[in-house]
Amino acid sequence: MRTVAVILAGGTGQRMGASRPKQLIEVGGRPILAYAIEAFNGHLGVDEVLVVMAAGHVRTAATIAAPFHKVTGLMEGGDTRTASTVAALTALTGRSDDTRVLFHDAARPFVDPGVIDRVLEALVAYEAVAVGVPSADTIVAVEDGLVLSMPPRESLARFQTPQGFRLGTIRKAYELALADPLPAATDDCGIVHRYLPDVPIRVVTGSERNLKVTHPLDVVIAEHLAAEPERRP
Ligand code: CTP
Ligand code: MG
């Protein structure tokens, strides 16, 4: 059974406010996108890598992806992350329902092999797998500037990627989501949770290094992580 990693690089990085999409920003002398592709290209459990790129930057992505032999497809994304995921699912039309698919944010350059291992291991028994880390901060629900509820911190996790699925399951969830006039959920596990509520979603442990580069301060942190001894060539 094959495992396909999808690198979602279809966003434009509005919160970063840079002149180009944040996945093209260089840290340690290489674009963030290159690290994300490399992590999956170099993992023994991954057979293929697809890259979904923001419109207008597909050729740049092709140049970045060229050295990585597992990259078999490069396609343009959509206006939302959901639409970019759908572009990848469309490219996987005709593949067996048993195919394993991992969706990863291109903006997370430092996903380590252990996190990918844990997702793949969990996918043996589960059809949907998420990566979570405990929150150091207390998280509360707020409405109109007032606290609505305070779930116990121990029961909360912050989601990272990759999120892994049996292809048949994520395909079915998106079919239902696309037929629904309501706005879609913000991530792929959210789509499964909403449209296939009986499918259990296994949560495995992520890593603080697997940060999503989102704001300018994150680029400073990413530069430090890129310079860690284990990442030096
Ligand atoms: N993404 C995508 N297609 C979109 C939007 C987002 O493939 N239309 C990808 C991004 O490229 C990123 C990941 O989904 O790797 C997580 O999204 P996010 O961090 O929100 O990135 P952006 O949408 O680019 O940033 P912002 O929300 O600040 O504009
Ligand atoms: Mg976004």
Image: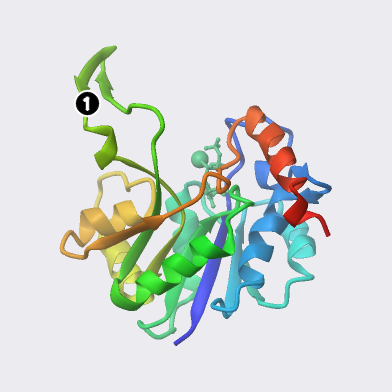
Q: Is residue 63 left or right of residue 150?
A: right
Question: Which residue lies at the image location 47% right of the left edge and 50% below the top edge?
Answer: 81
Instruction: Determine whether 97 is above or below 141 in the image.
Output: below
Question: Which residue lies at the image location 58% right of the left edge and 55% below the top edge?
Answer: 111
Q: Nearer the viewer, residue 233 or 101?
A: 233
In percent of width and height, residue 203 lies at: 33, 57
Question: Which residue lies at the image location 59% right of the left edge and 78% below the top edge?
Answer: 44
What kind of colouring is applied to the model shown? rainbow
In percent of width and height, residue 106 lies at: 60, 53
Q: How many marks?
A: 1
Q: Work out which residue is located at the far left of the displayed protein and give it.
A: 198
Determine the image quadrant of residue 89. Answer: bottom left
Residue with the mark numbered 1: 150
Q: Quadrant of the N terminus?
A: bottom left
Instruction: Determine whether 93 is above or below 200 in the image.
Output: below
Confirm whether residue 124 shows in the render: yes
Q: Quadrant of the C terminus?
A: bottom right
Instruction: Determine whether 81 is above or below 138 in the image.
Output: below
* Amino acid residing under circle 1: Met
Instruction: Determine whether 47 is above or below 134 in the image.
Output: below
Question: Which residue lies at the image location 66% right of the left edge and 29% below the top edge?
Answer: 216
Q: Nearer the viewer, residue 40 or 152?
A: 152
Q: Nearer the viewer, residue 36 or 208?
A: 208
